């Protein structure tokens, strides 16, 4: 049985800043930001601060998970390359 080559695409790695910005490119975050602005304009400062904290925690978790994915991908690529270089795979 023949299979394809064991290769992964090496894409250009995203910058940390770009990954962080992408965490805010979500309709739910936009709605929460609008709710925050509305809360501050109506004098509900505590609710506005709470929503900002929720958005920050969400972005932090998303950034952390994305960094773990990139790290795992790079380690996996090195393992596949090492196996391929050792001629274990034919």
Image: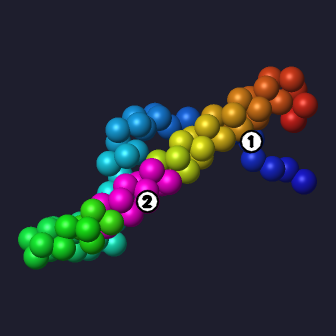
Residue at 33% in and 66% down:
50
Crowding at mark 1 (Cα within 10 Å: few <14, some 14-19, many 20+)? few
Residue at 50% in and 37% down:
11
Earlier-in-chain disc, 2 versus 1: 1
Closest to the observer, 58 or 43? 43
Query: How much space separates mark 2 and mark 1, taking CA atoms?
Result: 38 Å
Image coordinates of residue 78 in percent, x first then y, are: 71, 29
> Quadrant of the image for the C terminus?
top right
> Quadrant of the image for the N terminus?
bottom right
Which labelled disc corresponds to residue 5?
1
Viewer can see residue 56 = yes
Closest to the observer, 77 or 5? 77
Image coordinates of residue 59 in percent, x first then y, are: 41, 54
Residue at the top extreme? 85
Say left or right for 44 vs 52.
left
Q: SS of the residue at dot 1?
A: loop
Which contiguous range is marked in magenta?
51-62
Image coordinates of residue 32 in percent, x first then y, are: 28, 71
Question: From the viewer's perspective, is residue 70 above or below residue 35?
Answer: above
Which labelled disc corresponds to residue 62?
none
Mostly what secondary structure, the magenta segment?
helix
- Residue 48 in the magenta stretch? The answer is no
Crowding at mark 2 (Cα within 10 Å: few <14, some 14-19, many 20+)? some
| Residue matched to label 2 | 58
Say left or right for 11 vs 79.
left
Q: SS of the residue at dot 2?
A: helix
Name the image quarter holding residue 75.
Answer: top right
Image coordinates of residue 39 in percent, x first then y, are: 18, 73
Question: From the viewer's perspective, is residue 68 above or below residue 38?
Answer: above
């Amino acid at each position: 049985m023949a299979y394809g080559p064991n290769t992964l695409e090496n894409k250009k790695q995203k910058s940390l800043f770009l990954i962080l910005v992408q965490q805010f490119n979500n309709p739910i975050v936009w709605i929460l930001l609008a709710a925050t602005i509305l809360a501050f304009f109506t004098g509900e400062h505590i609710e506005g601060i709470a929503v900002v904290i929720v958005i920050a925690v969400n972005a932090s978790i998303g950034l952390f998970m994305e960094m773990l994915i990139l790290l795992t991908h790079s380690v996996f690529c090195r393992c596949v390359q090492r196996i391929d270089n050792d001629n274990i795979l034919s």
